[in-house]
Amino acid sequence: MSDVATQEYPAGSVGLVTPRHVHFDTPLTLACGRTLPSYDIVYETYGTLNADASNAVLICHALSGHHHAAGYHNAEEAAKGKPGWWDVAIGPGKVIDTNRYFVVASNNLGGCHGSTGPSSINPDTGKPWGPDFPIVAVRDWVKVQAQLADHLGVGQWAAVVGGSLGGMQVLRWSIDHPERVANAVVIASAPKLSAQNIAFNEVARQAILRDPDFHGGHYYEKGVVPERGLTLARMVGHITYLSDDAMHQKFGRDLRSEKYKYGFDAEFQVESYLRYQGESFSRRFDANTYLLMTRVLDYFDPARDYEHDLAKTFARATCRFLVLSFTTDWRFSPERSREIVDALVQAGKRVSYAEVDAPQGHDSFLLDNPRYLAIFRAFMARVAEERGIGDAA
């Protein structure tokens, strides 16, 4: 049971991958009180589900992520060396070893890569949902992921894994479906956003909302894209994903030419880089989805339902946890991960924690950091051993 075709690709690659779609007719009541009568989810799988379905691992993506976590969709991607967003961790012989595990990665509800979201057609109007798409919450995503697990025949995940906003989904899984999670890996995440993080999200949203091409979120019908606003939003966000040291090492104060031009074009290399990142992002991501995803981040606060006591929040969890943070991550600092760990310890849960030295900031969880991957690998190997999961024949 796999979406992977065997071809010649780099060592450790899952190779060519074909996304799958599933349609759910069961109405979904959302945390906001609204109900979706039906919805579609796009997902990918890597590896093979074993006979007792004990080797399934769920990958939860972050704000701008999607279902394409590993491998290649076509030969062109492979030729350009552009695999899925977490190819460094997923594949045969890698940390999440597809010789052992059946790995599932889906695009969250509200996304813009195939799952039902703002750019999808509203069946009541025959037009894109746009701003009329309901605001969703992390708990809604977990409900949908549980539906997907049922569809795939997975009763319990060997592990649920995610970084950043993905880590928040992992926490919600452990709270809402404790019997369906054997192990939880929470990377570079937080139990809720700080005021500073909410502020960054609001600046990004305002950049989009004030773009003259936004048209109140109905820009699809106008044949335009709020490119300027989305570009600025991504530029702001991208700054927060990198550390000061990483930006200094990569760009310093290097100029694009030898002299100052005394104008407002991109003169410094870092300016050019941010503009490129923002413009590239605006061509592949939907502005309404960006608004929605940042609001999901803002609203995440599971302890709100448990007298704002994080230890009480984790009382129902039964899985073992691995929590990882990075020294230079100031978007979701190590202190936020330690809040999670302290609450888990107070609640009497099994938890391992590591703060990894990494110069790249929040984005470190996506990168090939040997120390980070070694810790992660050891945990996943232990999961396989305890569940009796061997290499595929």
Image: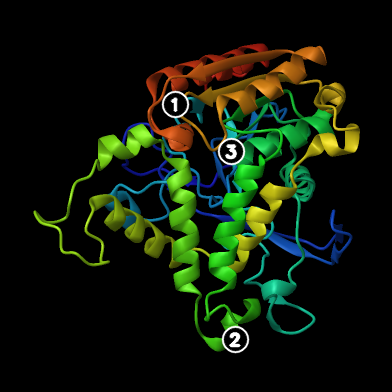
**Residue 186 occupies which quadrant of the picture?**
top right
Q: What amino acid is found at the position of numbered circle 3 in the picture?
A: Ser
In the rendered image, the quadrant that contains the N terminus is top right
**Residue 127 occupies which quadrant of the picture?**
bottom right
Q: Classify mark 2: helix, strand or loop.
A: helix
Dot 3 crowding, Cα within 10 Å, few <14, some 14–19, many 20+: many
Dot 2 crowding, Cα within 10 Å, few <14, some 14–19, many 20+: few
Q: Is residue 178 visible?
A: yes
Q: Which residue is mark 3?
A: 164
Q: Residue at x 90, y 32 (%)?
A: 307
First of labels 1, 2 by sequence position: 1
Q: Which residue is mark 2?
A: 221
Tag shown at residue 222: none
Q: Position of residue 180 (x, y in %)?
A: 79, 31
Q: Is residue 100 visible?
A: no
Q: Classify mark 1: helix, strand or loop.
A: loop
